[in-house]
Amino acid sequence: MINNMDKITKNHTLFQIQPTFNARNEYEKLADEEGLLYELIELSTPPALNESGFFSNALEWYKSTGRVNSFHGVFIDINPASGDKLLKGLSRKRMKESCVTALALGAKNIVFHCSCFPFLRGGYLDNWVKESAEFYLELLDEYKLNIYVENSFDVDATPLKELMKAINNNHVRVCLDFGHANYSRLPLEQWFESLGEYIGYLHISNNMGDFDDHLPVLDGNIDWEKVNKLCGELDKNTPITLEVNTIDNIRSALDFFKENHLFGM
């Protein structure tokens, strides 16, 4: 296996991309040129989960690259704290399968979406925090992966903050997705004010503040100069994943960050 995990990226920033198996050779060439690692998401979506031949072939190839630093776990229709025992059980089963896949790929980190229903608080939130915290600690004990919980449909930072306080473990932290934060009710500054000490991972994409469009970095309305300043207090080894489609869009984003000295580049 290629030992890409031990290489320091050329940019001295832990940038990751989300490749696709069909374009694997092009992504591998780009990753080699730019010193990038992978956050693999492709094996956590229903098409891959439902196709055993594709899943096993893709897993073996990605494993052989030695670049999978992180794995994005299942997220579509997943709720490990559901009040419906069958839904909760199936969600937890799928999440454990994601952890097994992450270990098979040689990943150190796994990302899961926050599944808290955003418009309910009180007893609902209390129960969600309790159930979720217990389950994430169970995953941590069983699989020994760094776990990052990502803001997804969240309108503000309260559920994630309460979850982190309940877990109180540095191996379970927040993945702050700027694209998701951009369409929330909360300005970016307040996400950092609420979650700053718990943020250990970043997702970068853009949108116009309405939908999760995963636009190229320069095609939405996020102020990346502001974001860069907000990230200034984070550890320089914080993984940053570019969640943008196509190799050209990834190159454009990296060029923009380099030209403007953003994110330590």
Image: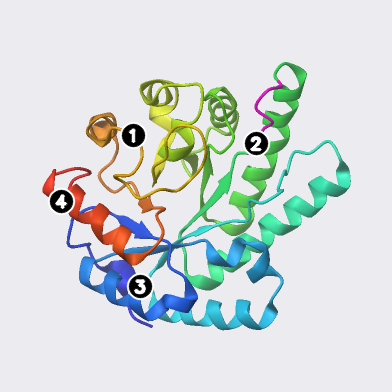
Marked residue nearer the N-terminal end (1 or 3): 3
**Looking at the image, which residue is at 52% across and 61% down?**
41
What is the distance, in whole Å, between disc 1 and disc 3 at their CAs?
26 Å
Camera-nearest label, 4 or 1:
1
Amino acid type assigned to the residue bearing label 1 in the image: Ile
Q: What's the distance in space between the residues labelled 2 and 3, CA to CA? A: 36 Å
Q: Quadrant of residue 66?
A: bottom left
Q: Report helix, strand or loop for mark 4.
A: helix
User: x%, y% of residue 161?
Assistant: 53, 26
Is 126 drawn above or below residue 167 in the view shown?
Answer: above
Q: Which span is picked out in magenta? A: 115-120
Q: Position of residue 166 (x, y in %)?
A: 60, 28
Please name the residue shown 54% across and 65% down the image.
42
Q: Which residue is mark 4?
A: 258
Which of these two is toward me, 160 or 248?
248
- Say which of marks 2 and 4 sits in front: 4
Give the class, few, some or many, for how many residues have Cα within 10 Å of label 4's Cα (few <14, many ≥20): some
- Classify mark 3: residues with Cα within 10 Å, few (<14), some (14-19) or many (20+): many
Q: Secondary structure at mark 1?
A: loop
Q: Residue at x 34, y 77 (%)?
A: 26
Residue 222 numbered tag: 1
Position of the N terminus, as image quadrant, is: bottom left
**Mark 2 or 4 closer to N-term?**
2
> Against 132, is 156 above or below?
above
Of the two numbered discs 1 and 2 on the same chain, state the one appearing first in sequence. Answer: 2
